[in-house]
Amino acid sequence: MNQLIRTSISIIILLFLTMLNTHALDNTGKDDTLQYLISLHEKNPEVVDYIIPIAKHYKEIEKYDRATVWYMKAAKIQPDNTDILFSIGLLQSWTDHYLTAIEYFDKILRIEPNHDDAKLAKARVLSWQDKRAEALSLCEEVLKNNPEYLDAYELKARILTWEEKYVEAIDIYIKMLHMNTNNKKCREG
């Protein structure tokens, strides 16, 4: 089979596995699959579809530094891809690189001003830095755009709890329970 056909088949298989949300790299032979993806990337370094599964694999096994390296390779190829930038921002926040994380979330918001996930992720990082007023403001923006976004309510309630505004926090948790009675975060709040 010629290289173009093998590459096309590989891309189709990767897309199929991604659509099924399987963890192909967690099955037996994961090292073979990973090495195969790396070899495909080495032969075709401009193909982001080879890079992303590698980055996701390292993210899933909590090797965040390696995942970041792979996502950054993808970002060099597609610098305005907000999904890639968001993944880098999350990884930076999880590894306590808060300022870098905020830079990535801000870049996303310059590209796509109503990216609620980036706003909420930034709000979460700001709350960890005790910048609660700014974090609450971002939660409000998200809820204005998307009044059903339970994670935004949850973060807002958590921040209000830290601020010892318990009545307001309880009201938000009650509102969340009315929106989704099975929400574990609400019941624990």
Image (spheres, rainbow, N blue to C red):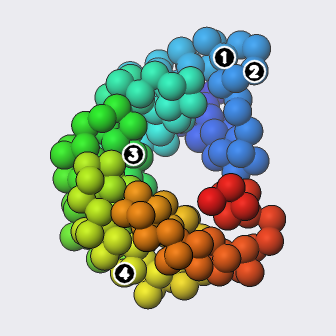
**Mark before the other along the chain sequence, 4 or 3:** 3
Q: Which x, y percent locates residue 115?
A: 39, 71
**Mark before the other along the chain sequence, 1 or 3:** 1
- Residue in the image at 72% along x and 74% along y: 177
- Residue in the image at 80% along x and 71% along y: 181
- Which residue is identified by label 2? 27
| Total numbered labels placed on residues in the image | 4
- Which residue is identified by label 1? 30
Tell which tag, 1 or 4, sits nearer the viewer.
Answer: 4
Name which residue type carries label 2.
Answer: Asn
- Residue in the image at 75% along x and 47% along y: 20
Q: Quadrant of residue 48?
A: top left
Q: Is residue 63 above or below residue 20?
A: above
Name which residue type carries label 3.
Answer: Leu
Residues at marks 4 and 2, CA–CA distance in whole angstroms = 41 Å
- Residue in the image at 66% along x and 25% along y: 25
**Mark before the other along the chain sequence, 1 or 4:** 1
Q: Which mark is residue 90?
A: 3
Q: Which x, y percent locates residue 179?
A: 71, 80
Tell which tag, 2 or 3, sits nearer the viewer.
Answer: 3
Q: Quadrant of residue 68?
A: top left
Labelled pair 2, 3 in contact (Cβ < 8 Å):
no
Task: Categorize mark 4 by other alpha carbons within 10 Å: few (<14), some (14-19), many (20+).
Answer: some
Which one is in front, 37 or 91?
91
Q: Which mark is residue 111?
A: none
- Which residue is identified by label 4? 141
Q: Secondary structure at mark 3?
A: helix
Residues at marks 2 and 3, CA–CA distance in whole angstroms = 26 Å
**Left or right placement of residue 2 versus residue 163 in this view:** right
